[in-house]
Image (tube, coloured by chain):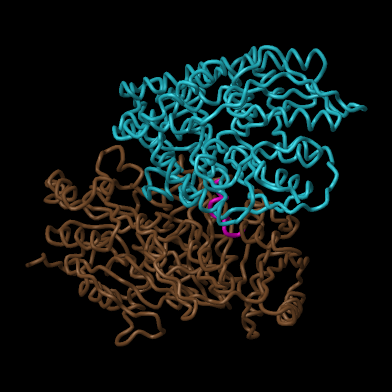
Chain colours: A brown, B cyan
Amino acid sequence: MSDAIAFLEPRANVMARRSIIIEDLADMLPPECLVHEARELVPFETDAFVAYRRLPLAVVLPKTTAQVSAVLKYCNRYGIPVVPRGAGTSLCGGAIPQEDAVVIGLSRLSRILEIDTFNRTAKVQAGVTNLAISDAVSPEGFFYAPDPSSQLACTIGGNIGMNSGGAHCLKYGVTTNNLLGVTMVLVDGTIVELGGKHLDAGGYDLLGLICGSEGQLGIVTEATVRLIAKPEGARPVLFGFETSEEAGACVTDVIGSGIIPVAIEFMDKPAIEICEAFAKAGYPLDVGALLIVEVEGSEAEMDAMLALIVEIARRHGVKTVRECQSATEAALIWKGRKSAFGATGRIADYICMDGTVPLSQLSHVLKRTGEIVEGFGLRVANVFHAGDGNMHPLILFNANDPDEAARAEAAGNEILKLCVDAGGCLTGEHGVGIEKRDLMRHQFSKADLDQQMAVRSAFDAQWLMNPSKVFPLDGRPETRAFSA
Amino acid sequence: MQTNFTEAQLTDPHVAASEKILRRCVHCGFCTATCPTYVTLGNELDSPRGRIYLIKDMLENDRPADREVVTHIDRCLSCLACTTTCPSGVDYMHLIDHARAHIENTYQRPLMDRLIRGVLVAVLPHPQRFRLALSLARLARPLAPVLSRVTALKPLAAMLELAPQSLAPVAKAVTVPVEKPVRGRVAILAGCAQPVLDPGINAATERLLSRLGVEIVVPKGEGCCGALVHHMGREAAALDFARANVDAWTREIEAGGLDAILITASGCGTTIKDYGHMLRLDPAYAEKAARVSALAKDVTEYLALLDLPRLAPQNLTVAYHSACSMQHGQKITLQPKLLLKAAGFAVKDPAEGHLCCGSAGTYNILQPEISAELKARKVKNIEATRADLIATGNIGCITQIATVANMPILHTVELLDWAYGGPKPAKLSGVAKA
């Protein structure tokens, strides 16, 4: 296991009261909503950032907002850290617990509460998966736009925590642009409602603040999201290039010329091979880099936009252009892309970066990324949301080799710094979690971080919520204990 | 993901194989989304990723199985939906097989659990005993509501409720003359529970194949495929069943040659296709078993190769229920539906088709509560298609779904036999053929 990133020392007074805490939680919840046996805690020790692991003190799986509130109120009163968890698909360790923490898992809050096609909204519980929303409204001709690659499994609560994006966010925006309202439990158990069924909640943009707050400002238990009418048609088109640099320059030019397709996804050769092995989507294997460009609308609209994109691609030496011929083929193209991270497990362990850069920097950052990883004696596969400039280099390594694991982490840090130095930022959609926490100083000055931490303290004075994440461990403000 | 085994541990070939499987998992969590028990219970511990982690922890620490681990492994249906979903290709089936064998070898179950499992193992794989047991079950059926009130006795109640109200008579060996020229020579697995519960399935298969010019042989000495005991972790017993079948089919292969070994219950098919793996460490059988596995085919896989003529559409809509062992275990998804369509049926796919109906071998007896929830969900989705009837390829699903569905459920091959000139299945007496 890696240990380059530290967690907070467990609070001795909490650890000493473990059995009392468990008894108290058992009094608060039905038996099937509490996990505390040593064996049963082990599977909760990590998420999809599996290099780091910490056993929690206990796990609760509440079925109602009232139960979430009761647990938070109790933990706040006794100074017990809490770590919220959706489906545990975080790539930055956002849901990894710590020894003195109670994990609040939202997986049992999995009901779709209301579908209002007239107002184009859906109200769902936080544990509903991202894809389940689109599946539920699809017969009515709608979908929920943000589509993280893990959308099959990840929950809307987790999406809000990380302000998740996805392939189709180029046109429709990320979670924060599609969230209308939440029911949220504050650290002291207070249940608040923010926003509603309409755009632009009154007062300060608290929804904007909550979205991407990584479970540190409160726990969202219900969300109202925007639904979007499905387009008349949608067509993913494959553009194969000789080199990654050519493909990157093509993306820069497409966006630069004012064209916004629904999605522009990038895969380099290793990524193409990995995805093709799993999905058999018919990706060209004889190219150095591939763009999946999706256009949508009427046939005429799609043709017109495609003609413009093809013309730009030709200027960048595109080798193959393949329009998909059927809905089945389109589904396979997206299945391959969205399974890229998991499918990488077929050939190696990996860590996935999430830096975002200005589009003009794409080619440069891609080239430097390759050099950095090679400098650490490792391999890299690139598969990412190119239209958003949201890079996802997958650094391949052998997790059973501690030296390789350390080099992979070091290479990752270099890449993220590169993204910041290129005018971008550490995270486009995965969040900071523990993975990028210690790099926050590379992006922000002390004054910036102090301001952000002041906001956090305003919501959670004791810093109980997901406490080891986001902000570097030293330089945090003094926390004050709860006083009733 | 990272694993932590010593060199000494890895000298055990079973541990070494499991270690390889674990190394493939990247802990992405995709599998949780399509796992019927996670969807039902909402607990990571009852998801594939959670179970993989429990098994990893148990094996790495060389620990005997304990109550907590057994609870969550027992709740796995072995439906293998996770293996269809898994992008990195984790071989969950062989990992959970290993875990089940480890449990059987290192854990003592509570008395009642042991007794019920003992009865299932002693009865189900043996058609005569099973037939007798079903007759007794009909007499005892009124006791089911009483038994279901006691937790430890719930499996008994489930057993009684699953027993059909009436049993078909023992199938008479009917020889159907094979149309000339002969297009192939196949063995059909007679099976154990299926001929007792529904002898019409293999009869339909034999009629259809004979009309199509396929010669059918019934090898002596063949019996239960072993899936039943295999899924209970009784490895030695499972391998004995496997060896007996490998012997029977090998004699036939060497005598007259076989083009295929046909299986009409997809649950059995998944296991027979795995004989090569199950017997890989047995030098006397490894090669023969691999040959048998390579010849094993679901009946619809074989029929799809025969170019059946396309028939005029008929006014009947079939909801096709893909058994987990069919779609996830054997990855057969298209052939049964294409055959039904070619035979003139309109075919509908129920929503959430990837989710198990809760039958899963003896799961509906051993885990009656989760099974009942899955059954209700499945039947609701099937009924929403407003089809006239249900087709599927596994006797377990047929028995499970028939207890509550308000439309007839048949094996795909029964419908094909009817469409291509066979008699109308008795179950369809109330359904008109337009």
In screen coordinates, is B373 left or right of A295?
Answer: left
Segment tinted magenta in the rendering: A337-345
In screen coordinates, is B352 left or right of A95?
Answer: right
Q: Position of residue B286 (x, y in %)?
A: 65, 18
Q: Is residue A201 above or below residue B343?
A: below
Q: Nearer the viewer, residue A362 or B400?
A: B400
Q: Quadrant of the C terminus of chain A?
A: bottom left
Q: Is residue A39 above or below residue A378?
A: above
Q: Position of residue B21 (x, y in %)?
A: 52, 36
Q: Please report the residue visible at 38 percent of the width from the left and 85 percent of the height from the top.
A: A200
Q: Nearer the viewer, residue A283 or A219?
A: A219
Q: Label the magenta part by its dominant secondary structure.
A: helix
Does residue A432 appear in this view? Answer: no
Q: Nearer the viewer, residue A287 or A80?
A: A80
Q: Quadrant of the N terminus of chain A?
A: top left
Q: Nearer the viewer, residue B133 or A348?
A: B133
> In the rendered structure, does residue A170 fall within the stretch colored magenta?
no
Q: Say which quarter of the image contains residue B60.
A: top left
Q: Position of residue A229 (x, y in %)?
A: 56, 77
Q: Say which quarter of the image contains residue A327.
A: bottom right
Most extreme residue toward the left is A484
